[in-house]
C-alpha cells in the first residue's frame, strides 16, 4: 500500500472484521514479524484482527523499494509512516481505533505514535520497552560485566572491556554487546520453540530472505549510526513527555539485559495515563518466549475489554 511516497507491506488477518484490531510495531528496526506471525500470533485470530507492517527499510518493504544507503531513517518519518498505516487500517476495517503493540525498537516507535495521535488508539502495549540511549545501554553493559565477572568468563569480559562503557562510536560495538547479551540471557531464560523462527513459505524464498537480511543491515546502521550518531543516540522517552491520553500497558522480561527491567520500571512509575499496568515475566529476556507471548495476550485482552 502507498505510505508517504513509497509502497509498504501490510497484512491484515483475522476471523471477523469487527474484532479489536492490533497494529504490531516490530523491533530491530529491521526485523519484521510478518514472516513468523502465523506461528507466533495465529491462535489470536479468533479474538483479534492482527495487522503486521514491514517498516520503511525492512523486509518486504525494503525488497519492493530498497532505499539508497545514504537515505536516513528518522523517528519523525517512521512515526508518520506508522500513523498513516494505522489510519488506513481503521478505514479498511471500519473501526475508529486500534490497539497499538510495540516491542524493543517497536516500543520506542509505538510511544512516539501514542504521543502523536492518541485519538486513534484504544491503548498502548509495550514489550521489552527501551527508554533512552545512555541510561539503558549503560545499565545493560554494567550488568553484563558483573555477570561475566561472577562467572569467571574471561572471554566475554575481555570483549566487554575492550569495548569500554557506552556510548560508543563504532557501529560494531552494539553487535558485540548483543551477542554477549544473548549468551547470558540464554542461561537464565526459557527458550522459545525453534519452529517459531521458520518463516512462512511466502517469506522463505531466496529473494525474500535476501531482502530481509539487506533491510536488517540497512536499518541497523541507521539505528546506531556510523559513529554512534544514529536514531538511537538521540532517543529519550522522558524528553517526549510522560503524560499520555491512552491506557498504558508494559510487559517486560525480568532477565532482559538489553533493556534492563529496572530502567523500564522507573519510566513506568513516571508515566501519567488514564490507567497503567506493568507486568514482569520471570525467566524471560529481551526476545520473546512462550511466557512473554502469554503475558502479551492477557494484556491485549485486558486492554480490549475482553
Image: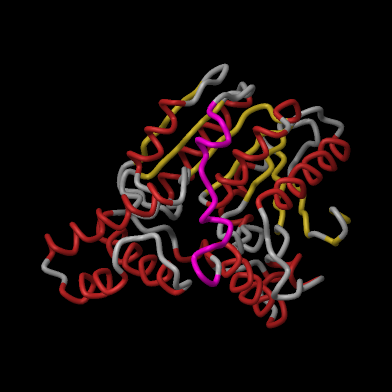
Quarter of the image for residue 125 reads top right
Kindly tell me whether residue 1 is visible in this rendering.
Answer: no
Coordinates of residue 232 in the picture (x, y in percent): 53, 55
Quadrant position of the N terminus in the picture: bottom right
Where residue 53 appears, as percent x and y from the top left, is: 72, 54
The residue nearer to you, when weighing 300 against 238, is: 238
Residues in magenta?
Answer: 226-242
Residue in view at x 53 percent, y 28 percent: 242
Say how the picture is coloured. secondary structure
Name the residue rendered at 76%, 42% in the picture: 83
64 lies left or right of 156: right
Front-lying residue, 7 or 79: 79
The answer to whether one can see residue 263 in this image is yes
Left or right: residue 20 versus residue 155 is right
On-image quarter of the C terminus: top right
Which residue is located at x 14 percent, y 63 percent? 149
Residue located farthest toward the bottom when viewing the structure as drawn: 206
Residue 238 belongs to the span the image colors magenta: yes
In the figure, 45 relative to 289: above or below?
above
Q: Per the image, is 281 magenta? A: no
Picture quadrant of residue 240: top right
109 relative to 31, above or below:
above
Image check: 236 left or right of 209?
A: left
Q: How many marks?
A: 0
Residue 275 percent across, percent down from the top left = 53, 18
Q: Residue at x 68, y 65 (%)?
A: 58
Amino acid at each position: 500500500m502507498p505510505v508517504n511516497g513509497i509502497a509498504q507491506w501490510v497484512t491484515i488477518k483475522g476471523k471477523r472484521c469487527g474484532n479489536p484490531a492490533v497494529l504490531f510495531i516490530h523491533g530491530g528496526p529491521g526485523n519484521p514479524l510478518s514472516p513468523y506471525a502465523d506461528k507466533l500470533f495465529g491462535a489470536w485470530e479468533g479474538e483479534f484482527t492482527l495487522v503486521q507492517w514491514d517498516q520503511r527499510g525492512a523486509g518486504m518493504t525494503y525488497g519492493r523499494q530498497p532505499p539508497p544507503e545514504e537515505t536516513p531513517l528518522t523517528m519523525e518519518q517512521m512515526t508518520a509512516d506508522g500513523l498513516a498505516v494505522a489510519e488506513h487500517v481503521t478505514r479498511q476495517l471500519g473501526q475508529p481505533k486500534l490497539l497499538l503493540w510495540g516491542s524493543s525498537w517497536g516500543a520506542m516507535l509505538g510511544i512516539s505514535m501514542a504521543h502523536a495521535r492518541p485519538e486513534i488508539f484504544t491503548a498502548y502495549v509495550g514489550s521489552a520497552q527501551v527508554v533512552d540511549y545512555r541510561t539503558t545501554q549503560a545499565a545493560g553493559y554494567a550488568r553484563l560485566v558483573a555477570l561475566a565477572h561472577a562467572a569467571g568468563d574471561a572471554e566475554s569480559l575481555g570483549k566487554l572491556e575492550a569495548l569500554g562503557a557506552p556510548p560508543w562510536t563504532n557501529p560494531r560495538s552494539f553487535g558485540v554487546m548483543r551477542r554477549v547479551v544473548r549468551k547470558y540471557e540464554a542461561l537464565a531464560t526459557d527458550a522459545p520453540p525453534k519452529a517459531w523462527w521458520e518463516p512462512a513459505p511466502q517469506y522463505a524464498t531466496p529473494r525474500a530472505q535476501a531482502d530481509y537480511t539487506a533491510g536488517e543491515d540497512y536499518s541497523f546502521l541507521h539505528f546506531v549510526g556510523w559513529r554512534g550518531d544514529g536514531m538511537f543516540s538521540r532517543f529519550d522517552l522522558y524528553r517526549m513527555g510522560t503524560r499520555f491520553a491512552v491506557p498504558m500497558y508494559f510487559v517486560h522480561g525480568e532477565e532482559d539485559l538489553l533493556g534492563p527491567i529496572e530502567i523500564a520500571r522507573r519510566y513506568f512509575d513516571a508515566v501519567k495515563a488514564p490507567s497503567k499496568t506493568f507486568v514482569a515475566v520471570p525467566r524471560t529476556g529481551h526476545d520473546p518466549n512462550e511466557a512473554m507471548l502469554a503475558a502479551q495476550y492477557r494484556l491485549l485482552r485486558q486492554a480490549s475489554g475482553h
